[in-house]
Image (spheres, rainbow, N blue to C red):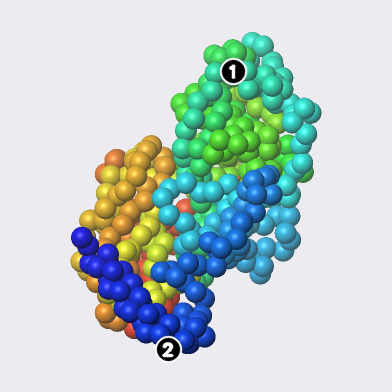
Amino acid sequence: MTDSNDDTRTSRRRFLTGAAGLAAAGAAGAARAENPKNLPPNVADWSKHLGDGVAVRPYGHPSKFEKDVIRRDVQWLTASRESSVSFTPLHELDGIITPNGLCFERHHSGIAEIDPDDYRLILHGLVDRPLIFTLENLKRLPRVNRIYFLECAANSGMEWRGAQLNGCQYTHGMIHTVQYTGVPLKLLLEQAGVKATGKWLLVEGGDASGLDRSLPLSKALDDCLVAYRQNGEMLRPEQGYPVRLVVPGWQGNIWIKWLRRIEVGDQPWYTREETAKYTDLMENGKARKFTFVMDAKSVITSPSPQAPIRRKGFQVISGLAWSGRGKIKRVDVSLDGGRNWRTARIDGPVLDKCCVRFYAEAEWNGEPWLLQSRAMDETGYTQPSKDALRKIRGVNSIYHNNGIQTWALKANGEVENVEVG
Ligand code: MTE
């Protein structure tokens, strides 16, 4: 028998004794005052009448008590809603899967609306047989299911010059992890027959931005998917309905949504999205190009600024870690700004290019903590401190900030985004 069960028994006994005493005194009103919401061990109000029947909500949605678990945006960040970003509420989630309705969104020209019957994917260029696929064509091909994270290269991009946004939703929420169902891109390329001179693909979206990127053929043949489902159901419009490209471990920008065209060529196209944008401006003024891979990174999601500690005593510290180079091997947690580290417990699946969920348990009695997490992947790479990253990258960058995050826990349980020297 655990302590908590004993507690329950004790309080129930106390309550029953009290209730009997009150009944004897004929003071039903007083009993109600002691337990105004009539909570258990009384028979609660929700147990006294029928609830809604089936199919009242043909497509289910969360309890009304979860109304604050939502994507949020930062209005001053972008000039328009159509070319903007919303953030995943990481502090409200557990496990590794992001529910479809909470996946962050990043669009350059709003959400394209495509009737699945009208959908077409063109595959042409240096191929023996140019092809056009309908959605039905794609669905009839052999398919696979894979769970991957998608992280925007600009995730944590506002933090290069110091701590700025107060909440992991905003500092790290340009990430989601879902299970994709789709056709290996390799299969489509094999059907078209890539010519020996074919080395790069141009992958292009069907939205008004026509977002396009150059993708090396080697990556396309390795693990890319042409996906039409996320977490079992069809892709959400925000995620590229009906078809998006999945480029495991690589920056989100190249995961083309509303995928309409794949052209095979012999060299990269140097599109706007890989020259003016999504390059890394280094300290010496040179721009680093094609930094496709998202390096190992982690964040403590709870406690965090939007998830303060409400009660002293035993605490479960929880977070996410991921790497675009393979599996996460270990996650460490520090309570003192990186002076001492303890190995966190990873719970749940550990998959290639996928988030893991980690936990560390600790007693807290009001002392200040400087909470940090540090991810290591199977290549031996360890997530760097922000200062170590700045030594190599300077502070001109926007993209690929995978430095260690620090949360300062104050005596009242509130948490703040800070940096330690
Ligand atoms: N594809 C198209 N066609 N149009 C877009 O605006 N945004 C890209 C990428 N694919 C974009 C796109 C960017 S910058 C990112 S980070 C991811 O999609 C975001 O994917 P999500 O909206 O599913 O989170």
**Horizontal and vertical percent position of residue 244:** 62, 35
Q: Visible in this render: residue 222?
A: yes
Q: Residue at x 35, y 41 (%)?
A: 349
Q: Horizontal placement of 214 versus 248: left or right?
A: right
Residue 219 or 376: which is nearer the viewer? 376
Q: Quadrant of residue 120?
A: top right
Q: Residue at x 73, y 37 (%)?
A: 206
**Horizontal and vertical percent position of residue 220:** 52, 27
- Image: 353 above or below 316: above
Q: Quadrant of residue 367?
A: bottom left
Q: Visible in this render: residue 87?
A: no
Q: Name the secondary structure under disc 1.
A: loop
Q: Horizontal placement of 378 versus 274: left or right?
A: left
Badge 2: residue crowd in 10 Å (few <14, some 14–19, many ≥20):
few
Query: Label 1 to label 2, Cα distance in Å?
Result: 75 Å
Q: Residue reaching furthest top?
A: 128
Quadrant containing the N terminus in the rendered view: bottom left
Circle 1 is placed at which residue position? 141
- Image: 146 above or below 340: above
Q: Name the secondary structure under disc 2.
A: loop
Residue 338 or 126: which is nearer the viewer? 338
Q: Amino acid at mark 1?
A: Leu
**Horizontal and vertical percent position of residue 191:** 60, 13
Mark 1 CB within 8 Å of ligand 1: no
Q: Quick one: label 1 or label 2, which is nearer the N terminus?
A: 2
**Horizontal and vertical percent position of residue 223:** 47, 29
Mark 1 or mark 2, whichever is nearer to me: 2
Q: Horizontal placement of 8 versus 417: left or right?
A: left
Picture disc at residue 35: none
Residue 344 or 261: which is nearer the viewer? 344
Picture disc at residue 25: 2
